[in-house]
Amino acid sequence: MSLTPASTELTIGERVYDLTHHTPMMVQYLNLKAQYPNALLLYRMGDFYELFFSDAERAAEILDITLTRRGTDKAGNTIAMAGVPFHAADSYMARLIAAGQTVVVCEQVEDNNKDDAESANKNNDAKAKDKPATGGIMRREVVKTLTAGTITDDALIAPNATPTVAALDVKLPRAGSSQPIGVAVSQLNLAAGTITTQEMHGTDKALEALRTEVQTVLARFAPSECIVSERIDEHWLAWLRSVIDCPVIEVAAADFHPEHAPVTLCQQFAVERLDGLGIQDKLLAQTSSAALIHYARQTQQRQVPQVNQLLVEDNNDYLIMDASSQQNLELFAPVTPNGTALTHVVNHCKTPMGRRLLVQQMKRPLRSRTLINQRLDAIEHLLNPIDDTTASAIDRLQSVLAEIGDVERISSRIALMSAKPRDLRKLADAIHNSARLQETLTQQGINLNDSGLLPILLQSFPAELPAIQETAALIDRAIVDEPPAHIRDGGMLATGYDEAFDKLTHLHDNVQSTLDEMAEEARQTYKLPSLKVGFNKVSGFYFELPKVQAQSAPAHFIRRQTLKNSERFITEELKTLETDYLSAQTRALAREKMLYNALLETLGEQLSALQQFSAAVAHLDVLINWAQLADSYQWQRPIMTDTADSSIDIRGGRHLVVESALRNHARMDASTPPNFVANDCALGSDEYPERLLLITGPNMGGKSTFMRQTALIVLLAHCGSFVPAEYASIGNIDRIFTRIGSADDLAGGKSTFMVEMIETATILNLASAQSLVLMDEVGRGTSTTDGLAIAHACVGRLQAMGCLTLFATHYFELTQLAEASDGVRNVHVAASEVDGQLLLLHKIRTGAASSSFGLHVAKMAGIPNDVVEDAKEYLQNLVQQTQAHHALDMPSHDKNDLANSHADKSESADTKGVQYTDDLFADIADSTDDKPMQNQQLAACQLLGDSDPDALTPKQAHDLLYQLKQLLEC
Ligand SMILES: Nc1ncnc2c1ncn2[C@@H]1O[C@H](COP(=O)(O)OP(=O)(O)OP(=O)(O)O)[C@@H](O)[C@H]1O
């Protein structure tokens, strides 16, 4: 914003407004708008929030509402306008925020009756008539700024969403300096009252590795918006915008100022020095955290005392999963619209804060064996109740939890003075209900004085925190049983809470009986049996007489209205009653609002106790959720080994999402086999010391499922949950990497193969001997020979790095690596052919597979028969052509070209059977080089040419392979 010296022009964004061309109201609007040039300003006018100029155009487009105009300015320019009704504003605001907009709400602060909660809070006793506005227009004030990451009102938050803001700060070394680049990402969760921060460093040479690390932290935080300094390095800003899926907002550089940050932090967290917070040496963690505090204060337009916890994170504390691995494993969101996210299947917590905590825990799988075992012990305890069956004990606990509302968000709204009366009622009910929770746990043998997680949690329950009990008692005394949704019309305070308020409401509520008494007295005194009493806006309180009796009205009856058959009169006495009545109503409402605000302030004093209680309920909810899953689906407690040399030994492991889908299908369609086939997976164990499994087998055989289930079991174990397996021993894993499937990133200018290679490069650069690596069909995105070469080299590198690797491939050539190396083991998913039909057994067996059965799978997928027949014929031709080429003894580069062109065609037809045969011939061609083809090789070609792969039984195929091997002397 800028004002010229004469103050008649105002620049907002790119546009200059001449204030002399506008009405006083528009001048008021423009002055307010100039303070928020990048936000949408909702300007309250009576029963509407109006938007003007470009704001109106933007809002009309997002909300699909009519764009009208509010006349023109004096220069004849049209003033665009769009409006939303005030009573339905929440849903419109929610949509604007979801579209990435910052919404600034400006209220009329002089008309008390129309105020909503916040404006009423600001100006309780304001009366429009008492405070005439300058220039005759209503006074208005911005009362709140709503942004995607700082909203706390349930009506504005999408279901299951957790609004958070991230702040990123970067420090680049001076040119020529050997200092590393520093980056910190901090996250503010306003409802939970936490700031979480992590600082990272890296060199310019290893920039990609540093950015991957930053991206991993951003994925863990999953912010709703991200703030940066307006002076951030432009390359980093461009990079951030390209990797983050939320609005990036530039804020004043002063908010990130390194010299002010310690003061801001010490003040917010009530400490003398930064040492206690653990970030005294982390300058960027300080600046980014301080920037978040400024942002919270600015958006809330008040202090944010509920933000009282600073958590400093370190990669070594968690099992790290980068952003693409989280996505590939569909942990929090499905990759395709029909897919199912893991959280959807496992998150059945009964409280909103429990559901949020479970997601947080899945984003931060622990590495500390002590902490993991603490959770596992608690689950085990819940699974062994002393006086009941497990199912009904868990059922009882969950039914109580379901009645506890969102204590976390209600507490934060209390701190922000925006809690509604129904919030308070819910809070008191939650506190009462928690007593039943505690009772049930005690009955199940959980004793406060014992050690373990459950007793620790119980110590934060109301029975142990008198402040919380007092909170509930206060709310019970203050708030009626069924309070109204808003405070604007009153009606929330209970009788007996405040004597003065009760007197005012008594006068108000008893007016009818007073009027009845007055009417009866007039009827008796003046002998007017038909006299009635009434009220309307024109006359106020009045007496009504039929025309025939109207003449007999006494002199002090003042005629007010004449109707067809009657006359209406007022009296001095009626007028006095009316004035008392109306002022009582206004005074009662004002007093009620004042008392309500005072109540919020009193409750705010118990904020940290409420937060403690809320966290305890959330943790308990998560543990009970894991226990319920373990009980329902026979999950077992994993053994968390702590050897430096990591290993995995899973027996009878299952993929819980596929298993649940099969269960659901079987329920609907009896022909679907209901059972998931459990599989073992051992890597680096005593019995199976190999650290790399090469997995082969037919398409649809279950290779990906097997790999993913291993990752999910490792992940769940590190979250402190039981796992879907008969037995699991899990070593100390530092990261999980995946290279599974991928989509084009066309917007980012990357092809499928490029994305595949970037992910592979990340793994090869960052994985350690303690990492679990999943590689699915690496190299398939390019020609067979290039792909095979890349896959071969990757296996070699991963083996040398000692990572625990699951490597699924259709390149059968790779299976030879197991023979050449001790560290590689072949396994395959079993399948067989019965009467020409492919039977997928989904069972993992030792050894390499014999074929990909690509044509069979194509047939199963519904590829028309004639196309499948064409493919078979083409396959035969390929075989014969290759034989012919070899017989003609072509120069080697031509043979390779042929092999490549076949390979490309076979890939594009996605018939892996072709690829297998083709690769075999390519090998033969390579081995013959420029020499004439040997007789044995010709015989082998002949043998292959004569055979019909589709007609072979597995046994015949096996025999054929042996014959070929013998002929080719390999
Ligand atoms: N262990 C199992 N038990 C039961 N069904 C399974 C099992 N594993 C996989 N399936 C079923 O088979 C389908 C295909 O599995 P998956 O995608 O893992 O095969 P794939 O071998 O990786 O195939 P492709 O090579 O074509 O990628 C799954 O969607 C699931 O329905």
Image (cartoon, rainbow, N blue to C red):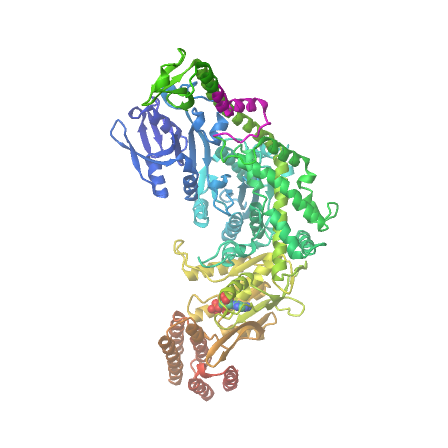
Quarter-of-image position of residue 411: top right
Residue lying at 69% horizontally and 40% vertically, measured from the top left = 463
> As displayed, is residue 348 above or below residue 292?
below
Give the quarter of the figure containing the N terminus. Answer: top left
- Front in this rendered view, residue 711 or 896: 711
Could you tell whether 37 is left or right of 330 in the image? left
Residue segment shown in magenta? 489-517
Quarter-of-image position of residue 714: bottom right
Does the magenta-highlighted stretch encompass residue 401? no
Image location (x, y in percent) of residue 57: 33, 39
- Front in this rendered view, residue 936 or 295: 295
> As displayed, is residue 267 above or below residue 901?
above
Of all residues shown, which one is farthest toward the top? Answer: 555
Dominant secondary structure, magenta: helix
Image location (x, y in percent) of residue 936: 47, 88
Does the magenta-highlighted stretch encompass residue 498? yes
Can residue 224 be seen? yes
Of all residues shown, which one is farthest toward the left? Answer: 76
Residue lying at 71% horizontally and 47% vertically, measured from the top left = 442
Image location (x, y in percent) of residue 343: 54, 54
> As displayed, is residue 19 above or below residue 453?
above
- Front in this rendered view, residue 233 or 634: 634
Could you tell whether 99 is left or right of 268 in the image? left
Can residue 278 be seen? no
Of all residues shown, which one is farthest toward the right? Answer: 449
Image location (x, y in percent) of residue 792: 51, 69
